[in-house]
Amino acid sequence: MRLQVVLVTLLLAGTAHAGLPGPVAAAFKRAGIAPSGVGIEVVDMASGRNVLSLNPELPLNPASTMKLLTTSASLDLLGPAYSFTTEAYRRGTLRDGQLQGDLILRGSGDPKLVIENFWLFLRKIRAQGVRDIRGNLVLDRSAFDDTVTDPALFDGDPLKAYNVGPDALLLNFHALAVSFMPDREQGVVKVRLDPALNGYAIRPPQLTSGECIGDWRAPISATLDAAGASFDGPYALGCGEKSWQLSPYQLSRNRYLELVFRQLWTELGGTFDGSVIDGVVTTDAVAVAQWESPSMPELIRDVNKFSNNVMARQLFLTLGRTVPLQPASIAASRSAIAGWLAARQIDATGLILENGAGLSRLERISSRTLGALLMAAYRAPTMPEFISSLPLVGYDGTMRKRLRFDGVSGHAHIKTGSLQNVRSIAGYVQTASGKQVAVVCLINDPNAARGGEAQDALLQWVFENK
């Protein structure tokens, strides 16, 4: 009888996530999440002592918490003062504002060459006396290899802005903000693109009466290709003004940049009648102007706080540019990160890297490796820059709506991640007793979407008890 009681007790403990704090175990049980698909690592930063773990060596899909690896490596390998440079050169003679030759733009992978920065860059070119370009606009993307990314590969939705692949001359994330504005008097929907594309035709959706019900985007079929933008389907008057972030994946990166360039260059008083072609900076080219991106701490802040997949992929690929005269590649990036982890004696057994952003079904990392990464980042001289890049619980980024009224609010910097069947958190908690503790919780389970309660309970428990 006594043996039976012991066996039953052990069985119940296994089903209730044995070893976990009561509130955390109970939340996992309510969510129907099996312990076999959960990896947890909690480490005291002062002593390096592990204070709680579950399946710590099990490689799991981390979703966007993989960005912690990419951003930490970028901050360390590239340096906190690192910035990306986009350069302009001219080839030919420049006299009285007329360039009898080509204007060349060379990129280095700037992940934040957004439209306002590109406009300022073009102003610098204009300030150097270039007004009328009588040759071609040459685009030098030689900093990255020419691997083509399939924007439909991840989830079959290439219009999603997060599916944009790396580009050494990435402009405005290769995205468009499409605004729909119903005009009752004229009976039409007015459509505005931001950035504006020079001479780009737009066919709006059909304006209908009635209320805005459900997902207003669902009835609209969007096509953005070389012929223009068309939005077939109904748009209800009751929807008012709405905005839709899209990637015009059917527009080549050259064509997209060309349309934006022609629009802005004309607004700046310039003229350009040539073609936009691929090429490289040649020895006879003369430097005209350059644009510097924000420094690395500012870039990783955008990546981590707002989980920007496109920027993360740009940083990841840049890590592979170990030889300045050779283009960066995925293979080189993986090798650079593996060497970086080994130099810091971080066991990366089971690590699988695809794009460094976590927007992947293939990527894997263990909670122990992530915990060791957080420990190394905490002990690095760039610790303040790294921690401040993570969402502040209850206040900003992807954690702004979680735990807002709990004690841990404002006392933890936590990166989140979510995919189908994946929920993850990783970061730092400043406990009520004043300790700094690293927390990692990776969930790979069909019920992972219900795991937020358990992860929040873990953060609150660490705050109160460690």
Image (tube, grey):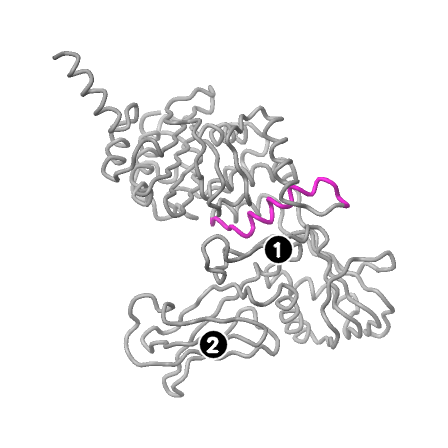
Image quarter of the C terminus: top left
Residue 465 x/y as whole percent: 32, 26
The answer to if 314 sits in the magenta stretch is yes
User: Above or below — where is 448 with respect to 218?
Assistant: above
User: Above or below — where is 236 with respect to 22?
Assistant: below
Tag 2 secondary structure? strand
The disc label shown at residue 191, or none:
2
The disc label shown at residue 160, or none:
none
* Residue at the extreme left: 1
The answer to if 82 sits in the magenta stretch is no
Image quarter of the N terminus: top left
Residue 195 shown left or right of residue 185 in the figure:
right
Q: Nearer the viewer, residue 152 or 297?
A: 152
Q: Nearer the viewer, mark 2 or mark 1?
A: 1
Give the magenta-colored segment's residue range.
306-325
> What distance separates the C-alpha of mark 2 from that of mark 1?
31 Å
Give the mark nearest the N terminus, 2 or 1: 1
Q: Quadrant of residue 403?
A: top left
Please tell me which residue is depicted at 46% across the width and 19% down the height of the picture. Answer: 47
Tag 1 secondary structure? loop
Q: In the rendered structure, which amino acid carries the disc numbered 2?
A: Val
Q: Residues within 10 Å of mark 1 (few under 14, many from 20)?
A: few
Please tell me which residue is depicted at 38% across the width and 25% down the height of the picture. Answer: 53
Q: Nearer the viewer, residue 11 or 464?
A: 11
Residue 363 x/y as whole percent: 49, 40
Residue tagged 1: 148
Residue 188 x/y as whole percent: 41, 83
Please tell me which residue is depicted at 65% across the width and 52% down the height of the picture. Answer: 109
User: Above or below — where is 128 with respect to 365?
Assistant: below
Residue 69 x/y as whole percent: 54, 37
Q: Quadrant of residue 220?
A: bottom left
Residue 21 shown left or right of residue 386 in the figure:
left
